[in-house]
Image: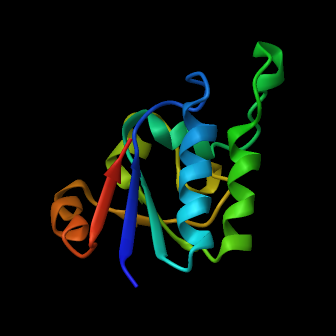
């Protein structure tokens, strides 16, 4: 079994990007692969609680990520500095994630067989 890391960097309501990435992640996990996700930069907004995207005619990205557990995708990571720079805390997120410091990211990525940055 290969280990996959999906690195998400784009904001929550950036067209269909989040939905497409989630489809890829769940498809990979459905084939019994080890899947982890890392949120960086503006992607941290994807996990923000109390989104109101229906005003823009979009789906709540935070709600979509609740399906990850159904596919045994539980290794979820977020960059601490990305949160801080955007005024968010771990308590403001809809899923339990593990925080990583920016200086840890490079070494962390080396643990995976495949890194998919979208």
- Which residue occupies the extreme front position in the image? 31
Q: Position of residue 37 (x, y in %)?
A: 46, 60
Q: Is residue 11 left or right of residue 23?
A: left
User: What residue do we see at 75% from left, 36% from top?
Assistant: 60
- Which residue occupies the extreme bottom position in the image? 1
User: Along the line of sight, which residue is nearer the eye, 73 or 41?
Assistant: 73
Q: Position of residue 13 (x, y in %)?
A: 61, 25
Q: Is residue 56 above or below residue 90?
A: above
Q: Is residue 54 left or right of residue 12?
A: right
Q: Position of residue 116 (x, y in %)?
A: 34, 53
Image colouring: rainbow
Q: Is residue 85 above or below residue 5?
A: above
User: What residue do we see at 40% from left, 85% from top?
Assistant: 1
Q: Position of residue 104 (x, y in %)?
A: 21, 64
Q: Is residue 1 left or right of residue 48?
A: left
User: Along the line of sight, which residue is nearer the eye, 80 or 110?
Assistant: 110
User: Along the line of sight, which residue is nearer the eye, 26 or 111?
Assistant: 26
Q: Is residue 44 above or below residue 7?
A: above
Give the quarter of the figure containing the C terminus: top left
Q: Quadrant of residue 52?
A: top right
User: What residue do we see at 57% from left, 74% from top?
Assistant: 31
User: How many numbered callouts?
Assistant: 0
User: What residue do we see at 63% from left, 52% from top?
Assistant: 93
């Amino acid at each position: 079994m290969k280990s996959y890391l999906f690195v998400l960097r784009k904001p929550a309501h950036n067209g269909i990007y989040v939905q497409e990435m989630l489809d890829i992640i769940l498809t990979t996990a459905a084939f019994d692969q080890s899947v982890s996700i890392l949120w960086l930069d503006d992607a941290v907004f994807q996990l923000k609680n109390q989104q109101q995207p229906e005003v823009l005619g979009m789906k709540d990205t935070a709600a979509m990520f609740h399906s990850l557990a159904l596919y045994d995708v539980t290794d979820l990571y977020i960059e601490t500095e990305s949160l801080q720079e955007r005024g968010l805390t771990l308590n403001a997120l809809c899923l339990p994630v593990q925080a990583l410091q920016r200086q840890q990211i490079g070494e962390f990525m080396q643990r995976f067989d495949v890194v998919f940055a979208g």
